[in-house]
Image: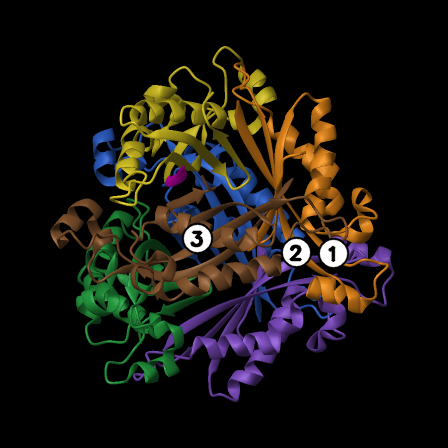
Chain colours: A purple, B orange, C blue, D green, E brown, F yellow
Amino acid sequence: MIYITRREQFNAAHKLFKEEWSNEQNMEVFGKCSNPNWHGHNYELFVTVKGEVDPETGFVIDLKVLRDIIRTHVTDKLDHKNINLDVDFMKGKMASTEVLAIEIFKQLKAQLDSLNVALHGVKLVETENNFVEYFGE
Amino acid sequence: MIYITRREQFNAAHKLFKEEWSNEQNMEVFGKCSNPNWHGHNYELFVTVKGEVDPETGFVIDLKVLRDIIRTHVTDKLDHKNINLDVDFMKGKMASTEVLAIEIFKQLKAQLDSLNVALHGVKLVETENNFVEYFGE
Amino acid sequence: MIYITRREQFNAAHKLFKEEWSNEQNMEVFGKCSNPNWHGHNYELFVTVKGEVDPETGFVIDLKVLRDIIRTHVTDKLDHKNINLDVDFMKGKMASTEVLAIEIFKQLKAQLDSLNVALHGVKLVETENNFVEYFGE
Amino acid sequence: MIYITRREQFNAAHKLFKEEWSNEQNMEVFGKCSNPNWHGHNYELFVTVKGEVDPETGFVIDLKVLRDIIRTHVTDKLDHKNINLDVDFMKGKMASTEVLAIEIFKQLKAQLDSLNVALHGVKLVETENNFVEYFGE
Amino acid sequence: MIYITRREQFNAAHKLFKEEWSNEQNMEVFGKCSNPNWHGHNYELFVTVKGEVDPETGFVIDLKVLRDIIRTHVTDKLDHKNINLDVDFMKGKMASTEVLAIEIFKQLKAQLDSLNVALHGVKLVETENNFVEYFGE
Amino acid sequence: MIYITRREQFNAAHKLFKEEWSNEQNMEVFGKCSNPNWHGHNYELFVTVKGEVDPETGFVIDLKVLRDIIRTHVTDKLDHKNINLDVDFMKGKMASTEVLAIEIFKQLKAQLDSLNVALHGVKLVETENNFVEYFGE
């Protein structure tokens, strides 16, 4: 069993807020992260798959295949977008790093399962001071 | 003459667009950077001042003073904000990295001039693949 | 179960030495790390907690709370200090990266337990070429 | 149980190709990575060992000892070399990151076992966008 | 006048050697960099252009245009290639970082001059410990 | 004219203080940087030389020569040392980043002048948030 990781990136806007709360309530819970006019980040996404090495190619998975899956199903939908407004798989969800990491994991797992590739986990870096890791339930 | 640089950061939303153009015209010129619902970045700002070393302290400038000027007059106004909508010194201006760097330089120069500190230049990093430097006219 | 990590930093002096040994014995075992007049590092500390996502906030923990705990109980005590001489929780202990990571873990665990937050582990980076990770016993 | 990691580096040439295939077949499977005239990378190798802290020294292992083992048995054999042609432990093997990580692990395990030091795993970074981790079978 | 920089990357093999010298002479002058079977690097290329900001767009240059010029005329020719053998503009030249930076500058200057864009300089990073900068004669 | 830069590192202890002042006066001017028991940093030093490319070797300077000069005359004297107490060329001087950069420049200039190599400047990075550059008078 060996683990291989691909990094992709996206630049997106978001805010932390609950529509059913007032701006004041949101500000109290989420602070500056709830600025009504949004803010944004350069996100880094690390996707790790695991498996045996194919003796023919020396690969667990062709990284170009993994890259294309990440781009098509995740980062192209997020890059230069508003996470709260523009992203199908985030509709109606809190745009926190935690929730975003879980939803990205689900998007990738659906794709990789159909290729019989084992998704190990995702790491989502929001700033140089914080990141989230999710490995499924 | 010696140069000393302080780094500060801010996370902000923006878009590249001209109000007098249609979304289609904006998309043609600015591509995905003109997404109507905004996107965002982790910006890094490097501010460089120059001068002689004070023989008493060994300092060109107390970096805590420089840090506080940058935060009060620049990064507190930009952090977790929308550059197009929320920032007084960017009102009515294109929110490109170039224009933002020039306007940040002007804000800092006004403050540092009044302290007789020579601002050398600013470097504004938008992503790991692009940055702008401005040293005044 | 999801993992979230906060990075904090501190700049500190230390040396590796045993009081009951001579300088020569210390030099033999610890090499240049036992320089009697100290040396120092920019340490990076990564603190990882784990838990379920709160459906109300999208958070495992409010990162501002985690940041304040790390600063109050760990990094404010270490930053611009001498690890061997100035830090209450390191008194009488070897100032190696290993021991420091374990003691930092204990400080944080005591605080986080009282909040019912699960500390997963700490990573302490001493230089770009070495770091230590500790996850409890 | 605590984990300590040492980073070493090497700059090497390689290509992904199978001798029994034509250049066209290799290009079809491996793309630009099979360029007949080679290409190369700055590799970063992170080696993690685990153990109890020695109460006398505060160490799991003297990092100078670990560094010397990594250099003598792994990175000196790879640095400024051709992975396919020059490296004894890679003879007849695919020069993929996965296979290289596994073979490096085996080299280190043989050495560390003889010192009663537990090798936890290796991480081999090929570019800023991809890396492999191997923890043994 | 403002300066804007774009980063691109390439992974390439090379060696430092003179054909008219023996392997021993090459080894004496160039050390391990002259390994006959090649070695390689992850190169980072920073290209800086300068100019006035277009008041209509807020741009000195559309970075997508600059990126495409760098890729077409420089990095696509170098990426996953052998600098000594595969690159038209390096034929018959020493594959040192210095010479490569100068030749890259010439390639870009020819293109940018025809667009009336002023090339300020290039920075070519070979490893984390060394880089070269060239600004023309 | 081309510029080539070599990075070296050192880990050192220091404090900012004037012997003729009380601890209180030092604390007032230098804040936590004057902690009597010292603190420390991982310093990065970038040394840039400039010149014409030797047509025989493709080099401005053999980087191994530059590396050895930096290590012998600068970083071996600073690494794992106390800048205030242990370093001959810093005796009686303020251990600020500014003063240290100037004194390092002088040490290197004396050596490089005797080899007819032109020292362009030094950059001394104290933390990820501050650095100093000095190019001579």
Q: Which residue is mark 3?
A: E104
Q: Residue furthest front?
A: E114
Residue C62: in sight, yes or no?
no
Q: Position of residue E19 (x, y in %)?
A: 19, 55
Of discs 3 and 2, which sits in the foreground? 3
**Is residue F2 inside the magenta stretch?**
yes
Q: Which residue is mark 2?
A: B41
Quarter that holds the N terminus of chain A: bottom left
Callout 1: chain: B
Say what secondary structure mark 3 lies in: helix
Identify the residue at image location x=35%, y=20%: F89
Q: Which residue is mark 1?
A: B14
Say what secondary structure mark 2 lies in: strand
Front position in the image: F124 or B27: B27
Callout 3: chain: E
Amino acid type, label 3: Ile
CA gap, disc 2 and disc 1: 8 Å
Kindly indicate whether the residues beneath marks 3 and 2 are on one polypeptide chain.
no
Callout 2: chain: B
The magenta span reads F1-7
Mark 1 crowd level (few <14, some 14–19, many ≥20, 10 Å Cα): many
Amino acid type, label 2: His
Whether the residues at callouts 2 and 1 have beta carbons within 8 Å, the answer is: yes
Quarter that holds the C terminus of chain A: bottom right
Q: Is residue D37 left or right of residue B39?
A: left
Identify the residue at image location x=74%, y=29%: B110
Amino acid type, label 1: His
Mark 3 crowd level (few <14, some 14–19, many ≥20, 10 Å Cα): many
